[in-house]
Image (spheres, rainbow, N blue to C red):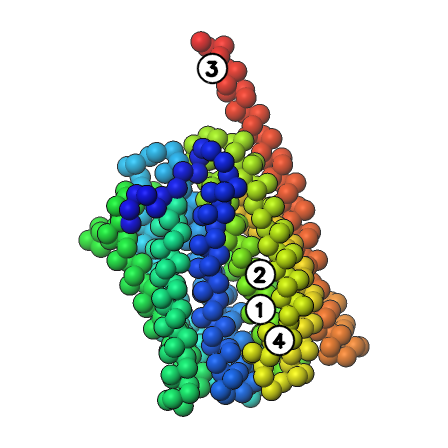
Amino acid sequence: MAKSNTMNMTSGSIMGPLIKYSIPIMLTGILQLLFNTADIIVVGQFVNEKAVAAVSASAALINLLINLFVGTSLGATVVLASTIGAQRDEDISRITHTTFALGIIFGMLTTVVGVIGAEQFLIWMDTPADILAQATLYLKIYFAGNLFFMVYTFGRAIIVAIGDTQRPLIYLTLSGIINVILNVVFIRYFGMGVEGVAIATVISQAVSAVLMTAALIKLDHKCKISLKKLRINGKQLKKILVLGLPVGLQNTLFSLSNVIIQSSVNSLGTLYVAGNGAGNNLDSFVYTSMNSFTQGGMTFAGQNYGAGKYKRVKNVFIAVIECVCVIGIVMGLAVYFNGRTLLKLYLPDSPEGIEYGMVRLLIMGVFNFLCGLMDCSSGILRGMNKSVFPMIATVGGSCGLRIIWVVTIFKYAFTHKTHVEAFKALLISYPVSWGITFAVLLVYFIITYRKIVSKENISNNDAVKTK
């Protein structure tokens, strides 16, 4: 990568560079979503709604098993961005090689756990019996190639820390095209089912992993890697884990609450699983678009915090909130008002499943901006090296509340109301938890920011007196 692809985050205007940095992340995230979307649409068009349900039922479990490690990669990005901002050149190579080595280790670990435990995990989630075999097959193949996903993810964590978000977009574009083509070839021309889309996903992820590794080896920057130097540096590992593990645990517990909710959806029947899965895939595009600015804001905040430019951190936060609100509200409404047309791509022969998908889009898609606000607050705090409280707030305000909601409000609705009413009651837990958690994180940010600025002013005054 040429040095011209890096970005100055610590001076000048914020909004323009933030948008320039975040848009490629948004497009990259959308392409990653298209892996799963292509799987669902192809099986919906060429197989049946049971195949759609099988792939959809796997999504929450996949996220649960990988989010601990993906969160750790975000911690690596923050550590590396802060180190670059502070210009501690001697640590950059150590952090880079430790990060990439972690990707390989975590990839092997998730492969073993995912392949061995796939069927039992799905049984624990009350996956309907008529889709259990297909869902298990999809999961086993998916996790067999998860090493590629982790290598790409941790490689991306390195490259975006220096401001290059374009290469990940290019690599995902190529691998996404390969994924879609192979989906159609395997299912339509080779007569495969869910195993075809799983194999296509693994192959496409292998392509992106190879391209990312090659780019890092040829990188014209201090973050360049050498395969011979790959090793875990204890000091840098500690830094990464201090910031990354709280994020990973937060994401894992977040996913655990989603698994519990997915289990509740599973208890309503296959059509609910299919409709909810299709709706979830659509509103995921809204979430991913907002989350790209959260990632951008986190990196900008990390570099400015490392450089001691604390007032710019506040301005970064304001800019991210503005972007998240615009994207979340506009896209959420657009998806909802075009919902039936979009859902028909996934469920062409299931009017009932489409109606269940519309219920999800109304309750969650329209209010998705609240989730974006919650995430960007947490992301900026991570950029300020504050990971523990965001984890506690998210786990308590979001995950904990949802679990309580499932065992109380949903349980009551499931017993005393219709399945549709129970489904609605279940989904309402999301926007309620998002709003509460955002309020808590916003208050914490204000308190933290004031303390940091106050200490900076005291330090500056002491320096003046010394002179």
Mark number displayed over residue 134: none
**Crowdedness of circle 4 by 10 Å Cα count: few (<14), some, many (20+)?**
few
Residue ID at (55%, 63%)? 285
- Disc number lying in front (4 or 2): 4
- Foreground of the two, 335 or 205: 335
> Which residue is identified by label 2?
286
Residue ID at (35%, 50%)? 159
Q: Where is residue 106 in the image (x, y as percent from the top left)?
A: 37, 61
Q: Do the residues labelled 4 and 2 touch (CB within 8 Å)?
A: no
Decide which of tag 4 and tag 2 comes sooner along the chain.
2
**Amino acid type, mark 2:** Val
Decide which of tag 2 and tag 3 comes sooner along the chain.
2
Residue ID at (49%, 10%)? 465
Mark 1–mark 3 Cα distance, whole angstroms, equals 54 Å
Looking at the image, residue 420 lies above or below residue 255: below
Mark 4–mark 3 Cα distance, whole angstroms, equals 64 Å
Mark 2–mark 1 Cα distance, whole angstroms, equals 7 Å
Q: Position of residue 420 (x, y in %)?
A: 73, 77
Decide which of tag 4 and tag 3 comes sooner along the chain.
4
